[in-house]
Image (cartoon, rainbow, N blue to C red):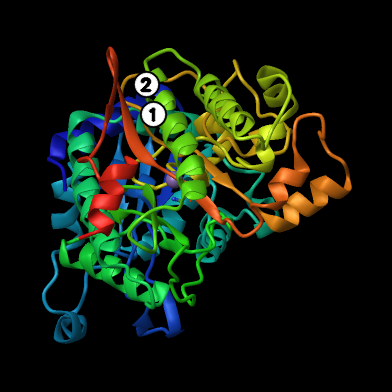
Amino acid sequence: MFKTEIYVERRKRLRELVKSGLALFLGNDEVAMNYPANTYPYFRQDSTFLYFFGLDQPGLAAVMDFATGKEFIFGNDIDIEDIVWMGPQPTIKELAEKVGIRETAPFSKLAEFLDEAKAKGRKIHYLPPYRGEHIVKIETLIGVPPSKVKKGVSEELVKGVVALRSVKNPEEIEEIEKAMEITDSMHLKAMEAAKPGMFEREIVGLEKGIAISMGGYLSFPIIFTVHGETLHNHCYGNILKEGQIVINDAGGESSMHYAGDMTRTFPVGKKFTTKQKEIYSIVLETQLNAISAVKPGIMYKEVHMLAAKTVTKGLKDLGLMKGDVDEAVAHGAHALFFPHGLGHMMGLDVHDMENLGEDYVGYDETVSRSDQFGLAYLRLAKALKPGFVFTVEPGIYFIPELIDQWKKDKKLEQFINYDKVEGYREFGGIRIEDDVLVTEDGHRVLGKYVPKKIEDVEAVRGR
Ligand code: GLY
Ligand code: MN
């Protein structure tokens, strides 16, 4: 937990952004796996609740009254029977004091408390719920039926929370660096341990074990696959074979739930083939160019477009694409190979604040989301500010189904050498990802260097 003053200050700043009404913040509950007492092994608190109230326990809610400045934590103290099974726990009052809140009450008082506010015609702000039980709670506590919950979300509160959570303070950067220590160790271990003949899941198990043994957890389900052309591939059943390449997209979460997110691609054998090296070099050049462009004020969409051009130029040099690079990118031809965005914000969530609405996080009045295939998936487009932390993760993939569809439709054939592309159907995919902080005068890549230059990757694979 951070020091008390940090939480007090964050809430003070939120009060400057949202001027009236009350806000209800629902903490998360344990999630039952197959019966209530057998929960999923990892309790994950809601990230906005953690940001403003710091308490990492289930069964809590908080209220901020923007008119009076009063703040409340609602939750139940445990009784002697709970102590028998769970051991002693601090009281709600003791917990609340740690984050500078004096007013507490049992959870059962929350509905009554909110009823009184409603009776006075006061607005109750809430954030978009992403768990079913929160939708039920919003109905029982505020009387908004499930079908109307989405419409009732407070845009004012969402914007206030996004404005604050987007800019990471030094304490948060330190936490992200801790997540990076875990992430770096996971990646290095995977790069060292993967051998032909192993199942993908053997490496996934090692990585997860490292995250837990270092006091953290995973920030998202690991993607470790020889079928990297499937962007979010969560199957781990393939056997690694000499000649293949494997994508490892994995991140640790610090004990305070800040995320890391990194991707490395390496050969299953000791060396990349020439064909793999050629594509890998384009992705690496794209990533390094994009990172170099990061500075305050630049639109991330501009950095994404730079990446798209580097990919296109590289593929043109290899004979897979043709025509004018700028024109090809303007038409979205590169998206056959690079069909996703360059990156996303990262913080308490690996896709930071995605539950609040991607467009509030990554877009603003100066830039709206494109509907072009590929560019439409860009999660962060707006101008960068010091304190933003996000990923830079270009990739090149050969997705047989997508190639077949585009080829059949003769899509953008003035920019794509479909005959040559056929020779890459079995290639898979390559992605390289790091996490970057925008500083006052440029940027800093977070975490330590995990091999990504071809010779460094091959040196680890050859050990
Ligand atoms: N690391 C997975 C993703 O960014 O979607
Ligand atoms: Mn990512």
Q: Which mark is residue 83?
A: none
The answer to whether the residues at label 1 and label 2 have Cβ atoms under 8 Å apart is: yes
Element under label 2?
Answer: helix
Asked if one can make out residue 256 in the rendered structure from this viewpoint, the answer is no
Q: Residues within 10 Å of mark 1 (few under 14, many from 20)?
A: some
Residue designated by label 2: 292
Residue designated by label 1: 288
Front position in the image: 354 or 461: 461
Q: Is residue 463 above or below residue 323?
A: below
Q: Which percent across, then down, holds residue 337?
A: 63, 42
Amino acid at dot 1: Leu
Element under label 1?
Answer: helix
Residue at the image point whose x is 15% and y is 86% from the top: 84
Residue at the image point whose x is 67% and y is 18% from the top: 326
Q: Which percent across, then down, holds residue 444?
A: 26, 26
Q: Is residue 408 above or below residue 192?
A: above
Q: Which percent across, then down, holds residue 458?
A: 29, 51
Q: Which percent across, then down, holds residue 3?
A: 12, 40
Q: Quadrant of the C terminus?
A: bottom left
Mark 1 Cβ and ligand 2 under 8 Å apart = no
Residue at the image point whose x is 45% and y is 76% from the top: 239
Asked if one can make out residue 408 in the rendered structure from this viewpoint, the answer is yes
Outermost residue toward the front in this view: 274
Amino acid at dot 2: Ser
Front position in the image: 106 or 407: 407
